[in-house]
Image (spheres, rainbow, N blue to C red):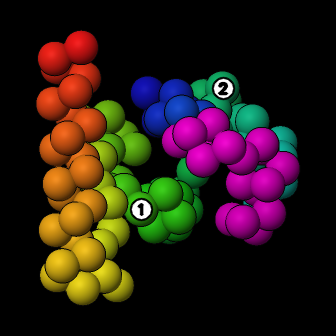
């Protein structure tokens, strides 16, 4: 599950394994091993992954299906706009 989540997020961010490895200071082989379930990242690295992808460790571990978006640097008005966009997209997915 964890490996699948890492790969899904990596691809969603249009990153290859080398790019993600550089961002996390690990090798491409390490990323590949995580994604294939050969090894598991350490707890510290799990936190780094969650921070990098702006999600929770529970989401990475498959314990929570809710994806998060960090809006802490936005104004209240900007965050409200993001919420409206997400709601509109969600509604169009359910209607179409």
Closer to the camera, 4 or 87? 87
The answer to which image quadrant residue 50 occupies is bottom left
Identify the residue at image location x=41%, y=62%: 54
Mark number, residue 54 = 1
Tell me how far mark 1 sits from mark 2, CA to CA. Answer: 22 Å
Q: Residue furthest top?
A: 96
Residue 58 in sight here: no
Residue 55 image position (x, y, % from top left): 36, 56
Identify the residue at image location x=68%, y=43%: 14
Closer to the camera, 10 or 88? 88
Identify the residue at image location x=22%, y=71%: 79
21 falls in the magenta region: yes
Q: Residues within 10 Å of mark 1 (few under 14, many from 20)?
A: some
Identify the residue at image location x=52%, y=28%: 4
Q: Is residue 36 left or right of residue 79?
A: right
Question: Compared to 37, does 29 lie above or below?
Answer: below
74 falls in the magenta region: no
Q: Secondary structure at mark 1?
A: loop
* Quadrant where the N terminus is found in the figure: top left
Q: Is residue 42 left or right of residue 35?
A: left
Q: Is residue 29 left or right of residue 44?
A: right
Residue designated by label 2: 36
Residue 23 image position (x, y, % from top left): 72, 66
Question: What secondary structure predominates along the stretch shown in magenta?
Answer: helix
Q: Secondary structure at mark 2?
A: loop
Q: Counting residues from the N terminus, which is met first, the one under dot 1 or under dot 2?
A: 2
- What residue span does the magenta drawing correspond to? 9-25
Residue 95 in sight here: yes
Foreground: disc 1 or disc 2 = 1
Task: Determine contact: label 1, label 2, CB under 8 Å.
Answer: no
Residue 9 image position (x, y, % from top left): 53, 41
Closer to the camera, 2 or 22? 22
């Amino acid at each position: 599950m964890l490996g699948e989540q890492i790969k899904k997020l990596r691809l969603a961010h249009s990153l290859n394994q080398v790019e993600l490895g550089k961002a996390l200071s690990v090798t491409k082989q390490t990323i590949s091993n995580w994604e294939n379930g050969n090894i598991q990242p350490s707890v510290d690295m799990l936190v780094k992954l969650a921070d990098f992808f702006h999600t929770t460790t529970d989401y990475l571990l498959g314990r929570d299906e809710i994806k998060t978006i960090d809006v802490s640097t936005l104004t209240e008005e900007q965050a409200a706009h993001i919420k409206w966009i997400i709601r509109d997209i969600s509604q169009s997915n359910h209607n179409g």
